Image (cartoon, helix red, strand yellow):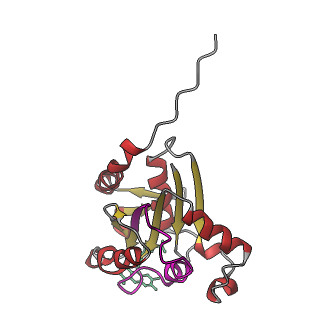
Amino acid sequence: MHITSLSASPSERSRSAWLTQFALTRLEGRSTRHDDILVRQLPAAALLAADVQESAIAAAVRAVESADLVIVGTPIYKAAYSGLLKVFLDLLSPDALRGKLVLPLATGGSPAHFLALDYALKPVLSALGARHVLDGVFATDAQLRRHDAGGFVPEPDLIARLDRALAPLLPRMRARPEPALSC
Ligand SMILES: Cc1cc2nc3c(=O)[nH]c(=O)nc-3n(C[C@H](O)[C@H](O)[C@H](O)COP(=O)(O)O)c2cc1C
């Protein structure tokens, strides 16, 4: 299974990007290919001008279009997904997500916005053809505490919700065979 992850926070030390990477570690050994897109690292002028010919943007769009599973990670800003995410999603063709599995992930400061994935992001994913959207996972900042050594510490409940969202994928993904023992 080819997995493309899309992280759409402007922050360098991003909770939602960390959660996206953490989801990938829960699937470790099961993907045949993985592409990681940090939208904030794409060339800003080309992104804002919707220049899909620009090489890094063209490669990012191809990585989404060729994926079997797209993991979309975003912070919640002003009760919705980030503007950075919308700028990138607007570059995709209307059927870019058709036939793909999509896992929406978000982090937010307030539990009041836990439905933002449902009311704000899912309609956009649907407009891009997505028909197989896994349960979204929303984490508050309190559920993903900063670790002194860098990174974050997820609460057990968050790990359980993430694993539940990923569970429907597991039968579709072959675990990589163990390397043969040499004698
Ligand atoms: C400009 C801005 C707007 C925000 N708006 C909201 C909001 O409406 N609801 C919410 O729950 N959190 C809001 N937050 C908090 C972030 O969503 C939260 O800290 C999130 O974990 C940040 O993710 P990131 O580290 O990946 O950028 C906002 C933060 C910023 C900087």
Q: Where is 89 relative to 157, above or below?
A: below
Q: Nearer the viewer, residue 135 or 55?
A: 55
- Residue 5, x across and y down, in percent: 52, 62
Does residue 14 appear left or right of residue 102 in this picture?
right
The structure residue drawn at horizontal position 56% and vertical position 45%, both measured from the top left corner, is: 32
Ligand 1 placement by image quarter = bottom left
User: Whole-percent x and y of residue 99?
Assistant: 43, 61
Residue furthest out toward the bottom: 49
Does the magenta segment cover residue 88? yes
Q: Can residue 5 be seen in this view?
A: yes
Give the residue at the far right of this rendering. Answer: 55
Task: Return the residue nearer the eye: 143 or 96.
Answer: 96
Above or below for 56 versus 164:
below
Name the residue: 35% across, 81% down: 120
Highlighted magenta segment, given as a residue range = 77-105
Q: In this view, does 118 lie to the left or right of 81?
A: left
At horizontal 47% and vertical 73% (from top left) the residue drawn is 95
Q: Total of numbered circles in the picture?
A: 0
Percent of width and height locating residue 80: 38, 82
Asked whether 18 falls inside the magenta stretch, the response is no
Q: In this view, does 98 lie above or below 151?
A: below
Q: In this view, does 109 lie above or below 158?
A: below
- Residue closest to the eye, 112 or 128: 128
Judge whether residue 15 can be spotted in this image.
no
User: Split into 4 quadrants, where in the image is the C terminus?
Assistant: top right
- Residue at the (67%, 84%) spot, across then down: 51
Which quadrant of the figure has residue 179?
top right
In the rendered image, residue 87, in percent from the top left (x then y), is placed at 54, 83
